[in-house]
Amino acid sequence: MANPRRVAVTGIGTVSALGNNLQEFRSALAAARSGVRALPAEIALGSGVQVGALATWDPAAHFKGPEASSLDRVAQFALVAAGEAISSSGLDPAAANRNRIGVYWGTGMGGAHTLETAYRTVYGKNDFRLRPLSVVMAMNNAAGSNVALKWGLRGPFANFSTACSSSAMAIGEAMHVIRSGRADAVVAGGAEALLTPGMLAAWQALRTLAPADGADAAASCKPFDKRRGGLVLGEGAAALVLEEESHARARGAKILAFVSGYGNSCDAAHMSKPDRDGQVRAMHEALGEAGLAPEAIGYINAHGTATLVGDTVECEAIRAVFGEAAARIPVSSTKSMHGHLLGGAGALEMAAALMPFSDGLIPPTANLEQPDPACAVRHVPLKAERGEIPRAVMSNSFAFGGSNVVLVAERA
Amino acid sequence: MDTLARIKDLATRELSLDPAKIDPNAPLADLGVDSLTFIEFMFKVEDEFGVKVSDEDLRNIKCLADLERHVAASLQATGKA
C-alpha cells in the first residue's frame, strides 16, 4: 500500500559563500559564480591551506545586542538559514501545535570556533579560565537546539553527525519521522563552520584539499575535471521546512517539492576511501523508497568533491545504477561554487537539487573545462542549463566513515 | 563612574536590560536573568573589574546591589579601589 503521508518541502533557507539567502544562492548557481577565494592570512595562519568558501558574515546584521556572542558561528548560520526556511514556508509555529513540529539537524564538527578558542586559551596562553558558555556553544547539538529554542519547536529532535552526510541524513530521517505520524512538520537541515586554523591544519594533513588555481582562486575546485586537485572547504547552513502534505495544504502553503526517497548505507570498507557498492546501494534504496525507476530522475546533484578517487568512484556508481540513462541524466557538482560544507553539505545541495523544480534551471559544475574520461556521466559544464521541469531529482552525500546518504525529491 | 554605574552599564550591554528599569535590589530572576546567563555575566564582571567571584560568593549574590557590594569589597581588599 502506498504511504498516505507524503512529505512536502514548503520552505528553504541557505547561508553560504554564495550569499546569506536562497535567492542569492540560486542566482550564483545560475550564473556559475564561485564563492571560493583566497583565505585571509589570519584564518589560514600556518596551515598551508590556500583557498576556502568563506561566508561573508556580519553577526550584527542578524542578531541583536549580545545575542551573537552567545552563539557559535555554526549556530548563527543555522538560525539564519532556519529563519529563512520558516518564514518562506509561511508556517507560524506559534499558531501550530508546536509539540508536533521538530528539528532534525546535522553538523560534522559543531561549535568548532568555540572549541578552538578554548584550546587556544588553555594551551596557547596556559589560561584555564574559560567562558561559562563554552560547553553549550561547542556541543555538537547546539546549532539544532538553538533552532528549536528560538521557535519553540517541541516535537521530535535529533542531531546527526556523520561527517559529509550529516544533514542529508537529517532530511531523510525527518521525512521518516513525519511519515511515521510522530510529527506534522520538521525543520531539517545542517550547518558547518570550521574554517579555523586548527581545523584547516587537520584537513591539510589529509592531503585532500585543492591548491589555489594559479590564475583564479575562485576556480580552485574542479569536480570531474582532469585537472582536479581536491576539495575546497566551505561553511554555511541550509534548512528545509518539511511538512506532511495535508498539514501544508490545510494552511494553503505553497508546496515546492516532495521528499520521497531516502537511501542510507555504510561502506564498512574504509574510513575515507569511497566504495562504489555502498553508494550504489544507497541510490537503489532511495529510488526504491520513492517507487521510481532510474529514468524518472531528471537531475543528479552529485557529491562531487573534486578529489581524484571520489569523483571517479561516484561516476562509476551512477553508471551502475542508471545504466544507459546515465548518458542522458544531467549531473553536476555545485561544490565547485559553494565549496564543501561537510555536515551542512547535504542540506545545501538539496536546496540546489530542488532548483530545477522552480524554473527548469539545472545548476552547473563550474570550472569543468576538461572532463576526465574516468568521470563519464552527462555533465552540466560551466553554464547552467534550462530544460523541462524534471519529474524527480537526486542528491548524493557520501561521507568519511563510509556513510552514504541519497535523497530523492519529486516535483509538486 | 562608580562601581554600581559600571555594573549597570555592563548589564545593559551584556544582558540587554533597559538601564531605566534596572532595580539594583530586584532579584536577578525578576530581571529575566537565568542561571546560565548569570554565570556568563559574572565572567564578564570578573574581566571588567579584575576581581574573582568564587562559587561561594556566587551563591550569595542575588541582585546587582549584592554584586556591587562584593566587587567593591574585592577592589578594596586588593587595593584597586
Image: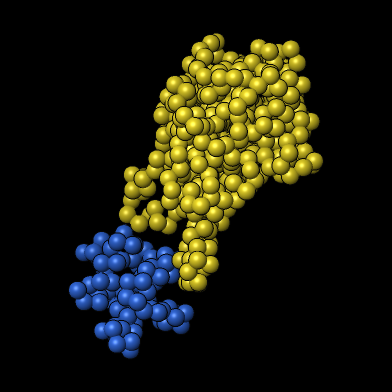
Chain colours: A yellow, B blue
Q: Nearer the viewer, residue A38 or A155?
A: A38
Looking at the image, residue B55 lies above or below residue A406:
below
Left or right of A275? Residue A197 is left
Q: Residue, x 54% and y 40% (percent of image)?
A: A233
Q: Nearer the viewer, residue B21 or A212?
A: A212
Looking at the image, residue B77 lies above or below residue A335:
below
Q: Nearer the viewer, residue A386 or A84?
A: A386
| Quarter location, residue A296 | top right
Looking at the image, residue A402 lies above or below residue B57:
above
Q: Residue, x 70% and y 32% (percent of image)?
A: A309
Where residue A267 appears, as percent x and y from the top left, is 77, 38
Q: Quadrant of the N terminus of chain A?
A: top right
| Quarter location, residue A379 | top right
Q: Residue, x 76% and y 28% (percent of image)?
A: A280
Q: Residue, x 47% and y 79% (percent of image)?
A: B55
Left or right of B77? Residue A11 is right
Where residue A199 appears, as percent x and y from the top left, is 56, 51
